[in-house]
Image: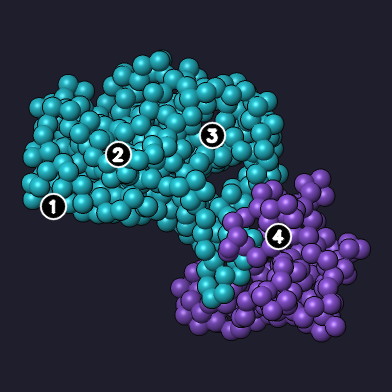
Chain colours: A purple, B cyan
Amino acid sequence: MTASTANQTLVADGVFRLDDDGRPILFGSRCNNCGNHMYPRQSGCPKCMFDGAEDIELAQTGTLWTWTVQAFPPKAPPYLGPVGADFEPYGVGYVELDNQVRVETRLTVGTPEELEIGMEMEIVAQVLGTDDDGNDIVTYAFAPTGDSSNNQENGDAS
Amino acid sequence: MNDVAIVGIGMHEFGRHDGVSGKRMGVVAVRRALADCGLDWSDMQFAVGGSMDAGAADTMVSEVGLTGLPFTNVVNGCATGGTALSQSVNTIKSGAADLGIAIGFDKHEKGAFRIKGPRGKDWYGGSGLALTTQFFGMKITRYMHDHGITQDALARVSAKAFRNGAMNPMAWRRKPMTEEQVLESMMLSWPLTQYMFCSPGEGGVAMIVCRADKAKEYTDTPIYIKAAAMRTRQFGSFEVLAPSTAIDRDPGPTTDASKAAFEMAGLGPQDVDIAQLQDTESGAEIMHMAENGFCEHGEQEDMLARGDTEINGRLPVNTDGGCLANGEPIGASGLRQVYENVLQLRGQAGERQVPNDPKVAYTHVYGAPGISGVTILSR
């Protein structure tokens, strides 16, 4: 999960993109009838039942609504991160994006003592592993705002 | 509409049974249910049955008897067994039949509850988010923050489950465990440790239901089904395996199903003498105590410390050891709860019989992707 000089590939198309600074922007939808925010993108609104939504890009900062720590390696596949001896516990949480939606996300912090409901968070790119062609597979995560290690997590693509 | 009674119950031991198919466990449960009320398979006017992972239930007729009866398969996630029962109840209520059987069984491998991502490239599972255990950790973390529940309370629930399971010959985990052992076991998904989670398991349950006015023909101890309600989630409910959740909050499908069942039965939480509540993990039992109306949010901490939900407590909860001690064969799990309540209402629960002379008994299942089923029984 450290910076790398390899080429990057996103874990999936149509879920997020990287901005000019290499920070992910999540793709969401806003209901054309009631304004409800949805992630990932979908057209049908579960709140007002209207079918029709506008594509939007979700906020890159928010507050931690709840969290846990994934302390054992997930089954791979589908998991693309390190398992076995290389596995390190990682945080998982829901981050509330102001007036939008709460998104489920990996957290860069994986120790309970450093996680607190309500803390300010910002989105960062995180490298899960490498694909068959040697490209870094990038997903999104949230990090405590101002955490000095966040820059390192951005995984400079150049 | 006809009232409905349970006249016969049968169960195959929960646990892991190498070499025994899920369907076979269903067959054993059926034969035991028939023996319980002295009926034959050929007396059954209909059957409703289901499993998640162990095949179509109706194929069991090749082993229990080709009588030509209408047999409906149901698959409805964690509410599969409950749905089999509620469909049977509705069949009798409507007058379409007088006597029939509800069946649930299952067989899951270790770690069976893994889910694939929602679309396209598997970014959700690929990113390490497709684990149900994470949801349970996150729901109880928020709940502890909002309502002052401690990790000690989580350990108390598990210790109670294994104590009760030790008195249940049908249970999988029958070794008592202290709160300390529970807390010191491997941390899986903060704040939940290994022994705060149930495991995918195996087992089968069957029950024979009939028109209430005919019940005494088959048993001296009919148990009446006062309500069987099922609900799915509404907007704002916080649910398992959701890439996002709304900022608006809804109390969730459990609260809806509970209210519907109490209304159907004409009863309230204060009337309930014993309850079996979904305890996928120990935090779930705590949250479900309040979601089902048995206490206010946050009161559980003191209730558990006082022993209110122990077998000899004010409201015994999960007297057979719950999912924690029995494991969770999805298709059978909801019917296991009803089986336990029938035993308790009959006064046949042996060592773990609750001493409060129970008259009204409550069951609750909850599962992905946000469903809940409740039954209320009385004698």
Q: CA distance from mark 1 to mark 4?
A: 51 Å
Question: Toward which corner of the image does residue B362 lie, by quadrant?
Answer: top left
- Give the x, y percent position of residue B301: 63, 30
C-alpha separation, residue under disc 2 versus residue under disc 1: 21 Å
Helix, strand or loop for disc 3: loop
The residue at 69%/44% (across/down) is B190
Real-space Cα separation, disc 3 to disc 2, in angstroms? 37 Å
Residue mark closest to the camera, 3 vs 4: 4
Name the kind of residue labelled 1 in the image: Pro
Q: Chain of mark 3?
A: B
Q: Secondary structure at mark 1?
A: loop
- Asked if residue B178 shows in the view, the reply is yes
Write down the quadrant of residue A34 in the picture: bottom right
Q: Amino acid at mark 3?
A: Cys
Q: Can you identify the residue that label 1 sits on?
A: B70
Residue drawn at x 64%, y 38% as measured from the top left: B193
Specify which label sits upstream in the sequence, 1 or 3.
1
Q: Give the CA distance from mark 3 to mark 4.
A: 43 Å
Chain hosting mark 2 = B
Element class at badge 2: helix
Residue pointed to by mark 2: B25
Residue labelled with disc 4? A82
The residue type indicated by label 2 comes to Met
Q: Which residue is mark 3?
A: B295
Label 1 marks a residue whose chain is B
Amino acid type at mark 4? Pro
